[in-house]
Amino acid sequence: MFELIIGKLPELKKLESTVAALERKNGESQARVQALAVKTAQALEDDLNREAAALNSGRKPPNATEPGLREQLDGAGRDAEVLARRLALAKGDRARYLSENHATILGLLAEAHGAEGQRVAAAAEEALSALLRLYGAEDAARDLQRRHPAPALENVGGPQSMVTVWGPQSTNNVGGGPSRGSLEGTLQYLITMGAPTVIEAGAEEGEDDEDAA
């Protein structure tokens, strides 16, 4: 969530790393519990079937495998419960840090937002310039074709297949892309993202203002 500013907040980086590691371990632990539960249930069925078959044939029942797996399942379940509680505590520590450093984090996010907006605006301005050059070349080619059409070739061959295109041809209706105005408008909007942006405070401050009034 805070990739753009995490390098400026070492404590938050540590908390985020701890939460991510515990989430990964917790997922692995839950998967192990589920796998052992399936194996334990199947082992119980196999043990009962082997015992019944042995007794019917007058033989001594073989050693059961389910108790050992049950012990592993109980241990894995306890480990999973401990990990779940560790994860909850770590998330609580992170939430407490975010609450206590709300203003600082908000300021860093606003700063990062402005910097990224300037990068987007610069890239959009460059793209718009290239787009206008592209359209200029297209317009010049179309104007040349209209004012000085190529001489018609003498038809000396047989009939050929023909494709009829109604209306003027351009990169829009032939290529199926967006209109010029749409592209230019989008890039013009992205250019405005380089302007400073004010990130308003949270709802809590607004509620305090109303109470004070």
Image (spheres, helix red, strand yellow):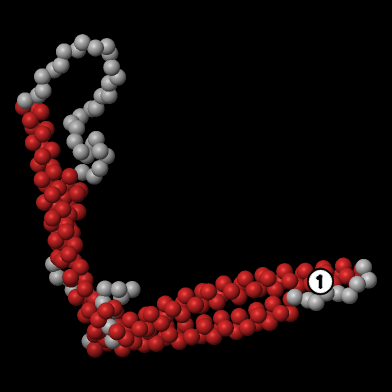
Q: Amino acid at mark 1?
A: Leu
Q: Quick check: 167 left or right of 83?
A: left
x, y percent for residue 21: 44, 78
Q: Which residue is drawn at the image coordinates 21% and 73% (left, top)?
A: 112
In front of the other: 140 or 181: 140
Do we see residue 98 in this rendering? no
In front of the other: 101 or 199: 101
x, y percent for residue 85: 51, 85
- Residue situated furthest right in the rendering: 58
Q: Which residue is drawn at the image coordinates 72% and 69% (left, top)?
A: 42
The answer to whether 124 is drawn above or below residue 203 in the figure is above
Do we see residue 34 in this rendering? yes
Q: Which residue is drawn at the image coordinates 59% and 74% (left, top)?
A: 32
- Crowding around mark 1 (Cα neighbors within 10 Å: few <14, some 14 to 19, many 20+) is some
The N terminus is located in which quarter? bottom left
The secondary structure type at the circle numbered 1 is helix
- Residue situated furthest left in the rendering: 147
Q: Which residue is drawn at the image coordinates 24% and 27% (left, top)?
A: 165
Q: Quadrant of residue 7?
A: bottom left
x, y percent for residue 98: 33, 84
- Which residue is under mark 1? 48
In front of the other: 98 or 31: 31
Q: Quadrant of residue 67?
A: bottom right
The answer to whether 142 is drawn above or below residue 123 in the figure is above
In front of the other: 177 or 48: 48
The C terminus is located in which quarter? bottom left
Q: Quick check: 125 left or right of 98?
A: left
